[in-house]
Image (cartoon, rainbow, N blue to C red):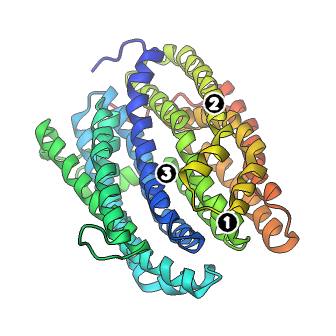
Amino acid sequence: MILENPTNSTVYSLAWPMAMNAILLQATLIVDTILVGALGEQALAAMGIATSIGGLILGVLFALSNGTQILVAQAFGADNKLALKSSFWSGSIIAVVIATTGTLLILTQHKAIVGFLAKAPEVATLASSYLTIFTIVIFGVALCQNMSVFFNATGRPKLPFFSKMIELPFNAVISYLLIYGKAGFPEYGLAGAAIGSAAAVTFRTLFLIACLAYFKYQYLLSSGWLHDNIVDSVKQHLENALPIAGTFISMSMAMSVCLMIYSQLSTHEFAALTILYLWIRIGGMMITAWAQATGILVGQLLGQNRFEMLDSFVGRSWRVALYLAVLVALIYSAIPFLFSIIYPELQQQTIDVVWTLLPLLILLPFTKASNTICGNVLRAGGQAAYAFKVHVSTQWLFTVPASLLCVLVLDVSVFWVFSLVLFEELLKAIPFHLRMRSGTWKNRLIQS
């Protein structure tokens, strides 16, 4: 496969289905929060605690899938079928092992973890029930995400998008029926939202498996492995993917830990932050998808040794990312009005918290857009270890301890707690842009 000189249109053709898929992925949680919102602040807080715990495992799965995506992209660019097969199955095996380990941990320790985080026994009971059912979602995501990044990196990003288009309404209907006991179904309350999500992700998994069969990826079932046998291939895949995944694992874990810290804020502040983080992820998905599409194409160009195109291509893509940041900032400016409509059961104190954080929300997309482009390009070019160090140092040496200090010791206002997210992005920007200018990131990971 020879990649033509990639333009903004080339990136767009990859980015828009990836963006829509990512938005719909987050929309599953948005649907749950909308449906659960009528149950009150306690149910929202319980779901926030449960999803922050489950998010640690999902973060690891998504992180490793990003590593798989880069390796598949370079293998696809090099037209190496054996490398494509090895990357797909190695990624699947690693994802299933992680999902199994995480599920066992949740099933054996969920009461202790939830009990530690929840302020009220009622919230702990609700969160525990939601979390145990959510383990089914973890297994479904493990399989779906590996198939999705394979389709993305091999030029079929619409398939994961279509799978989410099917999953979302299925999830909304089943969740609604089970939360409120409509149409003769039992009324499960918050647990009904988890059951609906579990049923929907199972349906999506079957759809993606059917897509693999329909498009006849015969080389996935061929004999032989890139590194002699399956064990060596999995080890090599993990060795290459882990530095790429490490960044995303750190990001997800830091966010989940911060949400756990935020659970010690007032109920209204924590409920506002729980919903805001969902919408921030949705707003950022346009930029993230553009950056990931850029990374995929950078990987394919590197797989073909076409180094001369990289600088001009990345520069064009970076400028578009900043234009997208302007659009996201405009969307964020309307969030308080949207919340009043979408979540009519929210109390005014919660909406007031959202208004307080609005200036930070509007500034955040600009730094995140530039950093996201830098991070994806560096990872595509073999500089994942550098990106990992930047993220780890800013998150775990600044954001997490500063959050602990501000919430548990200084008891500062929620505005200053949330401002730490913006300060983190400003800290990342300096080392990211210095490394991009150096040009040392242009490396090939897969040989023909």
**Residue 245, disc:** 3
Instruction: Please rate how many residues cluster around mark 2, counting C-alpha atoms within 10 Å: few if below 14, some from 14 to 19, many from 20.
Output: many
- Residue 336 coordinates in the image, percent (x, y): 67, 47
At label 2, the amino acid type is: Ala
Corner quadrant of residue 376: top right
At label 1, the amino acid type is: Phe
- Residue 46 coordinates in the image, percent (x, y): 54, 73
- Residue 217 coordinates in the image, percent (x, y): 15, 38
- Residue nearest the viewer, comparing 277 with 313: 277
Residue appearing at x 44%, y 72% in the figure: 190
Q: Upstream in the sequence, badge 1 or badge 2? A: 1
**Would residue 113 be seen by someone viewing this image from the given angle?**
no
Q: Secondary structure at mark 2?
A: helix
Q: Secondary structure at mark 3?
A: helix
At label 3, the amino acid type is: Ala
**Would residue 79 be seen by someone viewing this image from the given angle?**
yes
The residue carrying mark 1 is 270
Front tag of 2 and 3: 2
Check if mark 1's residue and mark 2's residue have beta carbons within 8 Å: no
Question: How far is the residue under mark 2 from the one under mark 3?
Answer: 25 Å
- Residue 282 coordinates in the image, percent (x, y): 53, 44
Corner quadrant of residue 142: bottom left
Q: Is residue 207 left or right of residue 232?
A: left
Residue appearing at x 70%, y 36% in the figure: 367
